[in-house]
Amino acid sequence: MSAAWRASLQRFLITGPPLVYLLLFFGIPTLIMVLASLRLPGEFGGLAPLWETGPSGTELNLSLESYGRFFSDSLYAWLFFKSFLYALVTAVACLLLAYPLALLIARSPGKRRDLLVLLVILPFWSNFLIRVYAWMIILGPESVLTRTLNALLAGLGIAPVELLFTPFAVLVGLVYVHLPFMVLPLFANLEKHDPALLDAAQDLGAGAWSRFWRVTFPLSLPGVYAGTALVFIPAFGIFAIPDLLGGTQGIMIGNVIKQQFLDTRDWPFGSVLSMVLTVGALALAGLAALFGRRTRV
Amino acid sequence: MRILAAVLAFAALPVLAADELHLYNWNDYIAPETVQRFEKACKCKVVQDYFSDNEELVTKLAAGARGYDVLVPTSNYVAGMAKAGWLLPLDRAKLPNLKNIAPAYLDTPFDPGNRYSAPYAMSITLIGYNEQKLKELGVTADSWATIFDPAILQKIKGRVSVLDSQREVMAAALKYLGYSVNETDPKKWQQARDVILKAKPYWAAFNASGYIKELASGNFWVVHGYSNDIYQADLGAQKAKQSFRIRASLPREGAVLAVDTMVIQKSAPRPDLALQFINFVLEGRNSADLTNMIGSGNPNREALGFIRPEIKAMKAIFPDEAASKTLEQLKDLTPKQRQLLNRLWTEIKAK
């Protein structure tokens, strides 16, 4: 076996399985979606047959109609934009909350660090929906939190507020659910920083603030980009949280996609919407990767 | 598509074993004692799987789910499911108890001659309310105006929920405007949308099932919901020793009646057990179990003798003749109509 041959075999063994996985579970389903977006909805769900033989001969049931409906109606673009804003605010809030936490964990001594990481992962042990339902109780109008808050507001002469079924509740849910996805990549990055760099910066006269902004933060950018992508992309397409915590105007694009596959039984239109979502998410992931690479140098 | 269908079908396939009846039913939609009695009678096991709305059931079957014996769709889905070739015609000779069903619920346009379906239980989509609160506020709940008229809504702002269902909310708005729930004229749909958009700022949420708990805990004062859910909210309020009771009101304009039916899946592993089960449930006593448990409406004449008198007296569960005449069952829409409705619904929810 020649060395070159062995090297390429090794490369294949390492990159092969994930490639096959991506092809099977991303490539092929995306292709199915592209095809489905060009077909017509079936009467009882699913898709209409690809061709039908009627009195006027065989007709191919392919059409760009679903794309036409999407592009001729600003309502859907507005929903994409609204979902984008929700996802963006979620990502920024997660970043602001997660960064100090990740830094604290990364700089903690061994045993305590392990415990803190465990605490970050702990919520995953209980079901996602149960955690969201817990928020419904916490934010409900008769909850201790809401009552205390409204009692305080009343003391200041401010009218009582509703917490549940508001955009605020949706954001709380989104941030809560996605926070660990920001903490973990940030921690993984911050943990690897060489403390000698900070010592060197200090020796050269940099204060604490300057050490953070000019050494730690630039070095952590790949973690920031990775965490932002991990939070932003799933938050963009989510439907369960706006369904449960959102009020009468809380829907996001994910809810509309879900409606196409369930209530409306319009799989082609649902495919168009999810393709736009996939393309948007891929473009943003691409941007994040590009920035990440640039700053790594 | 095939691959997707195969994957979904595989995921949905229950373990097939002898002497098991696979029932695909709504959540909490059969009394445990009925199941126990049937298991004893058939010397078999009942394996249940649950769906939370008809669309979920239809979507799963469209994706190729197999292995169920008895399914419980609402009547307006039966014709479509039969046309799609998913249902087995009923062997009427094996269903002598079908005669227990009141004639008004047999041989309907949804399934002429009951070729595929036998009525199971019913619910009416109506208004549930917190009796004490509405009395305090001087609000009545005898009309759809309670959830659509801003003049009334301003007294109960943020304490109202409507169903998270495009068909049901549209149907209520159409009734409020004096139209049939099955109206499909786009102009009238737009009128209904405008009614909904004017009322929406006063609603707390579109809520599919959480409203039971919210009514019982006093968070919601008025809901658009199913009669049996509202009955359960009242039970919940009593159990929690609340100072208020939850009542149901059938609006005078009329409402949607849903008749859920039992059908047999074409690929049923045990059509014999399925028929035995359907005939068993059609027995008066077994049929009454469900009504006594969840307050569902009951089309079974023989069940009446077994139903608790306080439930039988509730007009929202057993409407009198005059009220029954205002009830309508939803008909299925065409794909084009569904697209238009969804467009309006998305607009309603996004604004």
Image: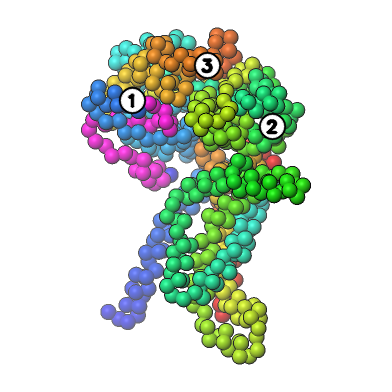
Q: Residue at x 59, y 34 (%)?
A: B218
Please rate how many residues cluster around mark 2, counting C-alpha atoms within 10 Å: few if below 14, some from 14 to 19, many from 20.
Answer: many
Quarter of the figure that contains the N terminus of chain A:
bottom left
Q: Nearer the viewer, residue B343 or B105?
A: B105
- Say which quarter of the image contains residue B130: top right
Residues rendered magenta in the picture: B3-31
Look at mark 3 in the image and give the residue it sits on.
B314
Q: CA distance from mark 1 to mark 3?
A: 24 Å
- Say which quarter of the image contains residue B346: top right
Q: Determine whether the residue tagged by mark 1 lies in a helix, strand or loop.
A: helix
Q: Which mark is residue B33?
A: 1
Q: Magenta stretch containing residue B19, yes or no?
A: yes
Q: Determine whether the residue tagged by mark 3 lies in a helix, strand or loop.
A: loop
**Which percent across, then down, holds residue A58?**
48, 34
Quarter of the figure that contains the C terminus of chain A:
bottom right
Which amino acid does the dot numbered 3 rest on? Answer: Met
> CB under 8 Å between callouts 1 and 3?
no
**Which badge, 3 or 2, is on the more N-terminal residue?**
2
What is the chain identity of the residue bearing mark 1?
A: B
Q: Nearer the viewer, residue A249 or B218?
A: B218
Q: Is residue A199 visible?
A: yes
- Asked if labels 3 and 2 share a chain, the reply is yes
**Which badge, 1 or 3, is on the more N-terminal residue?**
1
Q: Is residue A280 above or below residue B140?
A: below
